[in-house]
Amino acid sequence: MSRLKEKFNKELKQKLNDKFKYANVMQIPRMEKVVINMGLAEATKDKNVLQSVINELTLISGQKPQLTKARKSVAAFKLREDQVIGVKVTLRGKRMYDFMDRFFNIVTPRIRDFRGFNDKCDGRGSYSLGIDDQQVFLEINLDQVKKTQGMQITFVTTAKTDDECRELLLALGMPFKKQADK
């Protein structure tokens, strides 16, 4: 079992239950999935960019990414229907907890001028954030990176409110900004 999942089951469930006073233990919020998405605006011009992004996301997540394609053509963006415009990975179970553990404890301290993430959730129990550079991940070989690429990471929980989502992620180790820093 993952270190973070074990901590959640032994300590954090009880802590969340004490704070929010749930009637049933199944109401305690838990992590559902983590979705990592990388957009590829340059893939239309250079096919090697797509392969390098797939390799990097595979190293970061531990599983092969899924290609996302354009649903319809947009002439202004030189975009055709069914053209590959991004890659995404959905992590669940052990891989999800392992990724979160690495992200909270190893990757975020490596982000330049990092003072914490905003604590604004989406109102339905999910939290999304963006990273400008994939090179903060230790799995990436810096000699093989041709171009810096950003990514979006979404943490999906079973929480019903923003407060529950924020408390769950904070308990798991998400580095939010301090109240005085806002």
Image (cartoon, rainbow, N blue to C red):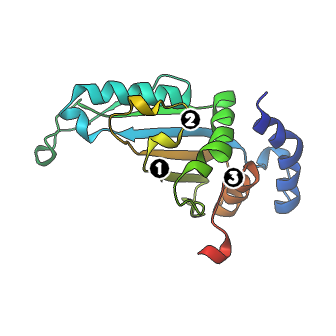
How many numbered discs sit on the rendered protein?
3
Mark 3 residue crowding within 10 angstroms, few (<14) / some (14–19) / many (20+): many
User: At x 44% / y 39%, what residue is drawn?
Assistant: 37
Image coordinates of residue 158 in percent, x first then y, are 67, 47
Q: 8 or 57, which is in the foreground?
A: 57
Of labels 1 and 3, earlier in sequence is: 1
Check disc 1 and give the amino acid type. Answer: Ile
Relative to 66, 78 lies left or right: left
Image coordinates of residue 113 in percent, x first then y, are 53, 61
Q: Label 1, secondary structure: give it.
A: strand
How far apart are labels 1 and 2 at the CA level? 14 Å
Residue located beneath label 2 in the image: 138
Relative to 182, 15 lies left or right: right
Image coordinates of residue 38 in percent, x first then y, are 40, 39
The tag on residue 131 is 1
Check disc 2 and give the amino acid type. Answer: Leu
Of labels 1 and 2, earlier in sequence is: 1
Of labels 3 and 2, earlier in sequence is: 2
Residue located beneath label 3 in the image: 169
